Image (tube, grey):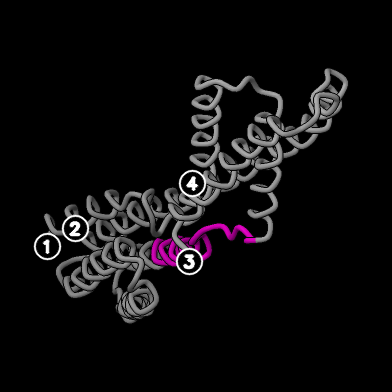
Amino acid sequence: MSTVWISLASFLAIFCSALAGVALAQHLPEPHLSAETRTAVSVSMAVVGTLAALVLGLMITSASNSFKQRADAIDSLAINIVKLDRVLLRYGPQVHDIRVTLKAYAENKVSQLSNPLSAEGGDLQTLKELEAIEDQISNLTPTTERERQIVARALAITQAISEARWLLVEKTGIAVPPAFLILLIFWLALLFASFGLFAPKNATVIIVLLLCALAISGGVLIILELGTPTSGLIRVSVEPMRSAIAEIGSGL
């Protein structure tokens, strides 16, 4: 199920619970709506509300950190690709083919990151290209100390590119267990049902409950979107990689 449908389902569950509370209040005997009852329910729901708020905050923070780590990995990958190209350029024209392969690797990586549907096959292809670049650099035969230093530096940068690549693989997103998400929505539905139970029965209250339910379901959407940065409405930008490709292309 897509993140939009999940957030919509959470909105319906929360808002309908509030409406159910409003409807239930009209059929309860007066003692069930007394000030003492209101106080007891409010205190109990305060615990549930605090727990739900803490969990929502932690989930948003975790999703945001995962999104940022993936964005940082893409930045690091783009920077190291440009650095490797500049190092190879200093070696001489004999590494032209390696630089062409490096540009092809960057283009395929952008295509893979931009199209999550082909991520699995594209990831294998880019891995082979990266290994081929490393093999080509290792097969160079430097004859001077300067060339040996360049080759060593190039291999070190290639290793950094490989590390950034594996970080991207590991940071594809965070998994939100369905049972955990259902439990969180249940807490929020209980909370809004208590709001509707004792709220005045007028249009202003209904609109406010509607807007609050929308706000919370928007928070759920943000969590799910940030937790899956390779797909959905919110994606990590690949512009640093495009800039790296343009930089390499200008020197070929």
Q: Is residue 31 magenta?
A: no
Q: Nearer the viewer, mark 4 or mark 1?
A: 4
Looking at the picture, how far across and down is residue 3, in whole percent? Answer: 46, 55
Q: Amino acid at mark 3?
A: Val
Tell me which corner region of the image, top left, top right, bottom left or bottom right, holds residue 150. Answer: bottom left
Residue to which mark 3 is pinned: 169
Please tell me whether mark 2 sits on a helix, a strand or a loop.
helix
Tell me which corner region of the image, top left, top right, bottom left or bottom right, holds residue 141. Answer: bottom left
Residue at 40 percent of width and 61 percent of height: 157
- Is disc 3 in contact with disc 1, using a CB cutoff of under 8 Å? no
Looking at the picture, how far across and down is residue 119, in whole percent? Answer: 37, 71
Residue to which mark 1 is pinned: 252
- Is disc 2 in contact with disc 1, using a CB cutoff of under 8 Å? yes
Whichever of labels 4 and 1 marks the residue nearer the N terminus, that label is: 4
Q: Which residues, given as a range, are shown in magenta?
A: 157-178
- Is disc 3 in contact with disc 2, using a CB cutoff of under 8 Å? no
Residue to which mark 2 is pinned: 248
Q: Amino acid at mark 1?
A: Leu
Whichever of labels 3 and 4 marks the residue nearer the N terminus, that label is: 3
Residue to which mark 4 is pinned: 221
Residue at 63 percent of width and 39 percent of height: 20
